[in-house]
Image: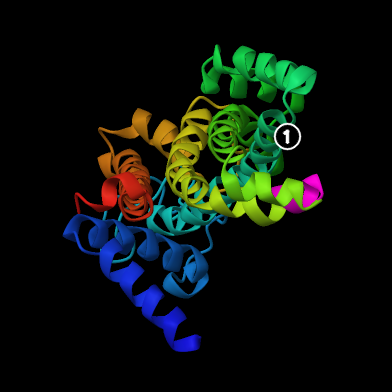
Amino acid sequence: MKNETNSKVKKFVKKLFKRKIVIFAAFLVVFFVITAIFAPLLTPYDPYKGDFRAVLAKPGRAHWLGTDETGRDVLTRIFYGARTSLMIGVVSVMISACIGVLLGLISAYYGGIINLVISRFVDVMMSLPSLMIALALGMVIGRGTFSLMVILGISTIPTYTRMMAGQVLSIKNRDYVIAEKVMGATNGRILLKHILPNCFSPILVLLTSNIGMTILAESSLSFLGMGITPPTASWGAMVSQGSAKLLINPVYGIAPGICVCLLVYGFNVLGDGLRDVLDPRLRGSL
């Protein structure tokens, strides 16, 4: 049994990393994760303590990417900004996935008035851009790391609800599900043992892709001043602050922007790779 499991894992990994672009994407994600975890060990500087003797210093031996308007090391702020982006991206996606999957599962399985109410709620939310919903919620809930996690989590619930509802509708009338009902299985058992496990693959693909999009949304909100509150390190806020200092130290605003692009690209391509491996309709084309 153990050998069979190991064989399946090796086969999955081999298929996933068959394309070099997926290997590169995985490298980017792992690189930023390691950077976020070991940030205190990678730099001697404090990300929140400035040096007024080195305000807006250009890149050099002491500060590889220069300093900001309060003398804080830009590279150090980028390291800690990776922590912020990844934490918000992962937690927000988990919030939206848990709520969205539950709503989609209940809506499609039970149908009737429950399906009608949940579907209308999803339709209303999907008619509005996610960023606009996030901005509106931000004005109500307020700013801060925890608030931003909740805001971004709520704004992306409809994606998971729609996806999960479609999956459940395609599974709930299959022979093995009907057989379980005939044998007297409870709805809870059918949902947890048969339907939810068979929907895991598309959920995993959507989770991976949405982490990147959530990180991009967090950076956008922070750039607009509606996201992370200072002095917490945030790539979006650094781009916003650095955009006014491009003539003095262009790296200050450009470097965090490049990090956002690379991390979002990494998660999106990794999500595409997972879809290619897990989607049975695409396996034959690999």
Q: In this view, does 132 lie above or below 206?
A: above
Q: Residue 121: x and y, percent?
A: 69, 17
Residue at (57%, 42%) from the top-left corner? Answer: 174
* SS category of the residue bearing label 1: helix
Q: Residue 204: x and y, percent?
A: 49, 51
Which quarter of the picture shows residue 34? bottom left
Q: Residue 75: x and y, percent?
A: 38, 57
Foreground residue among 166 and 241: 166
Residue at (82%, 49%) from the top-left corner? Answer: 186
Which quarter of the picture shows residue 96? top right
> Does residue 57 show up?
no
State the extent of the magenta-drawn residues as a range: 186-191
200 sits left or right of 53 in the view = right
212 sits left or right of 166 in the view = left
- Colouring style: rainbow
Residue at the spot of label 1? 106
Foreground residue among 78 and 274: 274
Q: Is the magenta stretch mostly helix, strand or loop?
A: helix
Residue 260 part of the magenta-drawn span: no
Residue at (48%, 51%) from the top-left corner? Answer: 201
Residue at (62%, 42%) from the top-left corner? Answer: 97
User: Considering the image in quadrants, where does the C terminus appear?
Assistant: bottom left
Foreground residue among 107 and 56: 107
Task: Check disc 1 and give the amino acid type.
Answer: Ile
Which quarter of the picture shows residue 167? top right
Q: Is residue 124 above or below residue 158?
A: above
